[in-house]
Image (cartoon, coloured by chain):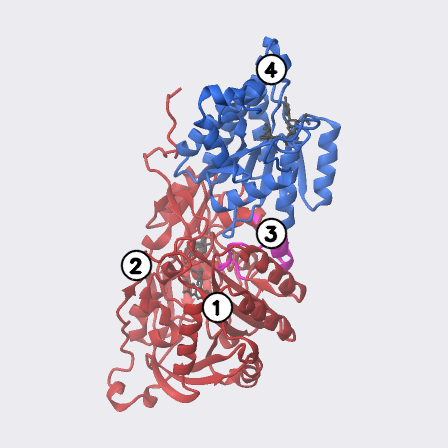
Amino acid sequence: MPDRTPAVPLDAAGRSPEPLSGWGRTAPTPALVDRVHDEADVRKVLAEARGRGLVARGLARSYGDAAQNAGGHVLDMTGADRVLDVDLAAAEVEVEAGISLDRLMNLFVPLGMFVPVTPGTRYVTVGGAIAADIHGKNHHVAGSFSQHVQWLDLLTADGQVHRVGPDQDPDLFWATAGGMGLTGVILRARVRMKPIESAQTLVDTDRTPDLDSLMTLLTETDHLYDYSVAWIDCVAKGARMGRSVLTRGRFARRDELPARKQADPLRYSQSVKVSVPDVFPPGLLNVVTVSAFNELWYRKSPKRKRDQLQSIPTFFHPLDGVGAWNRIYGPRGFVQYQVTVPFGHEETMRRVLERISSSGHASFLAVLKRFGEGNPGMLSYPSPGWTLALDIPVVSGLARLLDELDEQVVEVGGRTYLAKDSRVRPELFARMYPRLEEFRAVRARVDPDGVFTSDLARRLEL
Amino acid sequence: MIDALGSVGSLLLVGGTSDIAVATARRYLQERPLRVVLAARDTERRSAVAGQLRAAGATVEVVDFDAEDRESPERMVAEATAGGDVDVALVAFGLLGEQEQLAHDPDAVAALAQVNYVAAVVVGTVLAERMRAQGHGTIVALSSVAGERARASNYVYGSTKAGMDAFYTGLADSVAGSGVSVLVVRPGFVRSKMTEGLPAAPLATTPEAVAEAVVAGVRKGRHTVWVPGAMRWVMSGLRHTPRALFRRLPL
Ligand SMILES: Cc1cc2nc3c(=O)[nH]c(=O)nc-3n(C[C@H](O)[C@H](O)[C@H](O)COP(=O)(O)OP(=O)(O)OC[C@H]3O[C@@H](n4cnc5c(N)ncnc54)[C@H](O)[C@@H]3O)c2cc1C
Ligand SMILES: NC(=O)c1ccc[n+]([C@@H]2O[C@H](COP(=O)([O-])OP(=O)(O)OC[C@H]3O[C@@H](n4cnc5c(N)ncnc54)[C@H](OP(=O)(O)O)[C@@H]3O)[C@@H](O)[C@H]2O)c1
């Protein structure tokens, strides 16, 4: 017997586990991080990972514990980032799963191709985009990311690589799309890109005084736009509750650009990044600072503006201009509460917004969007209805408040989003996703021993 | 897993029939349904507690645990974690003993030390090993103010609590960085079945108050809590009271 056991077990190579958390910086847990570059590397870890299993991790932009695996292995996929094939005519690219949407844009926007779906940040990997089946401002016309995947190569627990797609083993494909890394490791994917004539968008802005007028406007005119999203001021109360700024747009054709831009219509560059230092005290983000910010922001936005030319970063990724803004919430971190409720239950959405507004748990960001049709993804989040997302710093009493809101949401057939989740009740989650049993059946088929697992999987008993 | 907002998914009660342990489970159940593993001797009380907690919304598992059996802790922890990780483990078993008898009965002293100290540190060792492997979890040890400065009226009990308190305090430091944490709880006089029939001491408290302190301490990631909070200052005063005076205090 050794006379002293180290607190943290080392693996054979003498590496020690690293604490990992998600974008919300809550509930960190230690895991052995394996930086993989290709299939052979992944296989090596799979052969080693016993007991606590493994899970893939992309750029860790999911908010909670999806890409964590306490006491086990975590595959850092960002080193597997090669482009394997490009078909310019068909606008298709074949890539390794660790490549980021940022890189895809840098490479392919100048060639006239945009990613089919982009979240509010371009720092996500293709693997993460499929595993969370992410949606963007174009969900109402284009669906979610996995609907633009022709096929993907999945390494499962038995060491086999399955090429799956909507018409090749669709069950495994639709369990993997939205399956949060729990069916295996996505190694490669073939993605259909969106052809574009310019790297500029034409944007319409509308300011609406309250939630009703916002929802009416969205219902009546959203179909006229490829991209649409509304930012809501969550701090405004009473009659001004739900006042918002709606921005909607589409990519500009080349002939719609001003003459000086027509020479180089696909010129794409990102603005310079400023980082937030890691020194914000907890509680900085209180109701006073947030409401002051929101007031300024609402007043600054135009009441109604048409055909404004905006760059890709300005229109799609305004937050990426500030690096590591998640640190602004201080060491206790924050959660993002994102829920969807079906059409016809607008009252529930209003109540959720009202409860959070009146709780004084300031929210820095609140985003409302109308979803289009869902897809066959078993744990895929989007479904016809309204989706609301808000960031809330961790404060006491929050657990209870959000549990109560979940109850109301589930009551009307709504749900929360796994990529954002760090706290939903397991039994409510099961009610939100009635196809969970089908997902479990696929997982039992390809991974009977549960080698692929994560903190999220354990927390929600997936 | 303990989630981002400190909500707990599974709770292991070692000494599952203890009043404080049951109050803690009930307090957690006020927040959410959860999995509760009752590790205790096979008694009617254990069945009754299992029934009560089920009625309060828990998914209850029952495993055998006997603090007088050297083999029991390993078996108990293996069985308790077979159905999934344990997020919070509360070490709650213990005996107060009769000081009158303990003063003259070496066997009774050995038995008390076995339950309150030996078994407590063996359980702590096995739990910590398991939690280090799972990479997360909180161990809560019910120590006592009686361990702060042993008194004539219960120095055998006090000494066992002093020993287990030192063990868990050191364990807390040893698991730093492993994802595991340890919370040492030091209640004063608690009105539970352990103290039934005894005159209540000053600052006497309830199992519910201890439960509240446990839940808050776990959520905040604390390492020590006193119940009631004022006990900390009282004991700090008593610790420095000159011996001649301390001996004559009616404690
Ligand atoms: C500022 C911001 C804005 C956002 N906006 C949106 C939005 O508008 N719409 C939206 O849908 N989401 C949005 N998100 C969430 C984000 O798009 C998703 O969480 C996405 O999954 C992150 O990708 P990632 O590469 O960082 O993956 P990670 O966070 O590292 O991992 C996410 C999940 O994917 C799995 N995974 C990663 N790579 C692989 C692989 N190769 N094989 C198998 N599984 C894998 C992981 O196991 C994990 O379960 C936003 C996030 C942020 C921080
Ligand atoms: N009450 C107080 O004033 C006070 C103050 C400070 C600290 N504490 C500590 O808090 C903890 C809980 O006490 P409590 O107040 O809740 O008292 P309690 O209700 O009497 O609980 C103690 C439990 O210990 C169990 N136990 C005793 N011997 C055992 C053995 N050999 N094997 C397995 N279990 C055994 C008993 O289970 P059975 O049902 O099998 O008998 C009993 O349920 C104890 O560690 C105690 O020392 C209590």
- Residue at image mark 1: A135
Q: Which residues are magenta?
A: A417-443
Ligand 1 within 8 Å of disc 3? The answer is no
**Residue drawn at 39 percent across, 53 percent down:** A331
Q: Nearer the viewer, mark 4 or mark 3?
A: 4
Ligand 1 within 8 Å of disc 1? The answer is yes
* Amino acid under disc 1: His
Q: Nearer the viewer, residue A252 or B179?
A: B179
Q: Nearer the viewer, mark 1 or mark 2?
A: 2
- Per the image, label 2 sits on a secondary structure element best described as loop
* Amino acid under disc 4: Ala
Give the crowd class for mark 4: few <14, some 14-19, many >=20 residues within 10 Å.
some
Residues at marks 4 and 1, CA–CA distance in whole angstroms:
63 Å
Q: Which mark is residue A342?
A: none
Q: Which chain is red?
A: A
Q: Residue A98, how many percent across, how many down?
A: 36, 57
Q: Mark 3 falls within which chain?
A: A
* Amino acid under disc 3: Pro
- Residue at image mark 4: B111
Magenta highlight on residue A273: no
Q: Nearer the viewer, residue A405 or A383?
A: A405
**Residue drawn at 37 percent across, 66 percent down:** A122
Q: Nearer the viewer, mark 2 or mark 3?
A: 2
Residues at marks 3 and 1, CA–CA distance in whole angstroms:
23 Å
